[in-house]
Amino acid sequence: MIDWLMKRPASTVLGGCLALFLLYELSVVFFAYTGDAYVNSDTVTLSAEIEGPIARLDVHENQVVAKGAPLFTIDPTPYQLAVDESTAALANAEATLALSRDRLTASQADLVSAQASETAARQTYNRVSSLARSEFASGQAIDDATRDLATATARAAASAADVDVARQTIAVNAASVQQAQATLNRARYQLGKTAVIAPDAGRVAPFTARVGDYLQVGNQVLTLVTDNRRRVVANLSERHLARLRPGQRVWLTLGSQPWVVHAGRVTSVAPGVARSPTAPLTLPYVDPTTDWVRLPRRFPVDIALDTWPADLGFYLGADARVLVIF
């Protein structure tokens, strides 16, 4: 047999290559292996939501923090002054509104009095007019009654106008109170953004921010590697997608412990990837690493360890090797 193979080297090499190809094609039915995998978890980038100098840094690089722990503080002085100013403006607006309501009450009382005077003057005018027709009232009496009625009517009209103006003033002052309240709410909101706390438990990644650095809105300050969803992401070839299912058994090694095998399970398979790095960032992009041969696309597969050992350090981005059993 060996002599036969030695006499036919071309056939031997071709047969060996064909056998290896068939073994590779059959292997995808039973398992998937990749060294293109890495450790991942949820990360949160803390940015400035207001501008100002950093007054205090409460953490250092690589520090473990609990949820709600203080991270850094932007100088609160101008924002506290804005709250104080807005509080005073609101108090002034509320006092002005209360005064305008008192004026409305007084104007309504004047209107009632003026309407009563108008009613009395009209009754007097009607009585004098009746007497004048019977020649029991002089012309002077008619003139006086007419003048008094006109005066009372004008006063009632003026009082009614004063009531309308008072009501409009109340509406304007009420709007001023709402505006002052909104300004105060915004000032309080901005003051609350001066102290930045950890949104979740995790570890602080290395950073370059220092006390005194002036921050603009949106400037990134810290990145927090949280303890949420610790996982391994394996970029597996698309030829395995038809057989990948959540819950499948996975065996893997981590770059930080290369000779220790960990057990895990598939938790999810990405439903799509971007075809180019310029596509929308809402889809993951996995570099196909093509030379002159077009390689299959790879899709991110999330894998959770059955248990993450307490003595196993967590290093975001560390390499891993993954074997998925179908």
Image (cartoon, rainbow, N blue to C red):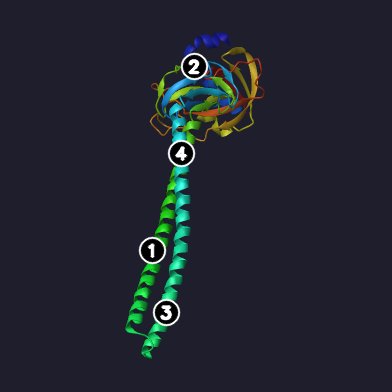
Q: Which mark is residue 209?
A: none
- Depicted 168 relative to depicted 271: above or below: below
Name the N-terminal-most of marks 4 and 2: 4
Task: Report the mark closest to the observer, 4 or 1.
Answer: 1
For label 4, count other residues whose C-alpha is less than 10 Å away and answer few (under 14), some (14-19) or many (20+).
some
Q: Which residue is mark 3?
A: 124
Dot 3 falls on a residue whose secondary structure is helix
Q: Amino acid at mark 3?
A: Thr
Circle 3 or circle 1, nearest the eye: 3
Label number found at residue 88: 4
Label pair 3/2, CB-CB below 8 angstroms: no
Residue 227 occupies which quadrant of the picture?
top right
Determine the residue positioned at 38% across, 75% down.
149
**Circle 2 crowding by C-alpha within 10 Å: few under 14, some 14–19, many from 20:** few
Given the image, on which type of amino acid does mark 4 rest?
A: Ala
Of 95 and 33, the residue lying toward us:
95
Identify whether 192 is placed above or below 206: below
Q: Earlier in the sequence, mark 3 or mark 2?
A: 3
Which residue position is annotated with label 1?
161
Location of residue 290 in the rendering, given as x and y in whole percent from the top left corner: 41, 23
Q: Is residue 173 visible?
A: yes
Q: Earlier in the sequence, mark 4 or mark 1?
A: 4
Indicate left or right for 17 with 126 as reference. Answer: right
Question: Callout 1 environment at 10 Å: few (<14), some (14 to 19), or many (20+)?
Answer: some
Q: Which residue is mark 2?
A: 206
